[in-house]
Amino acid sequence: LKNPSNNSLAYNAILVGRDADDFSLPKGNTVTIPPMKQGFVNVEFTIRFLHPAEAVLILISNKVDGVDGATLTFSLKSEVKTIEPHGIIKCRSPCYEL
């Protein structure tokens, strides 16, 4: 996110939608962008199912230095491209016993 103004911008981040619980903001729900700088919003995704997950990230402006920023929305969609096991366990067991 870029802040082209001479004042700081602050946002409260909210995740909403069908799979919002699978997404998280590891650095907290507040984003502050200094004047004439850019900031980053990291979103983490925890996969629980193979189907694509969807949510919406909403950034709602907090008034800082008397300045309100625009509300921003981002569509979040996951995509599973590969599946790799965490490990392999070998075991022996009879398939059938009388």
Image (cartoon, rainbow, N blue to C red):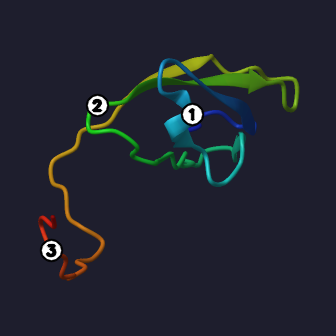
The residue pinned by badge 2 equals 52
Q: Residue at x 84, y 31 (%)?
A: 64
Q: What count of labels does the image hold? A: 3
Return the residue nearer the eye: 57 or 23: 23
Mark 3 lies on a secondary structure that is loop
Query: Which residue type carries mark 3?
Result: Pro
Q: Compared to 23, does 84 lie above or below?
A: below
Q: Residue at x 69, y 47 (%)?
A: 34
Alpha carbon of mark 1 to alpha carbon of mark 2: how far?
Answer: 14 Å
Task: Let me know if residue 1 appears in the view.
Answer: no
Query: Which residue type carries mark 2?
Result: Pro
Mark 2 lies on a secondary structure that is loop
Q: Residue at x 71, y 40 (%)?
A: 29
Q: Which residue sits furthest front?
A: 98
Mark 1 or 3, closer to the camera:
3
- Identify the mark nearer the N-term, 2 or 3: 2
Q: Is residue 90 left or right of residue 70?
A: left
Which numbered circle lies on residue 94? Answer: 3
Alpha carbon of mark 1 to alpha carbon of mark 3: how far?
Answer: 42 Å
Q: Is residue 86 left or right of residue 8?
A: left
Mark 2 or 3, closer to the camera:
3
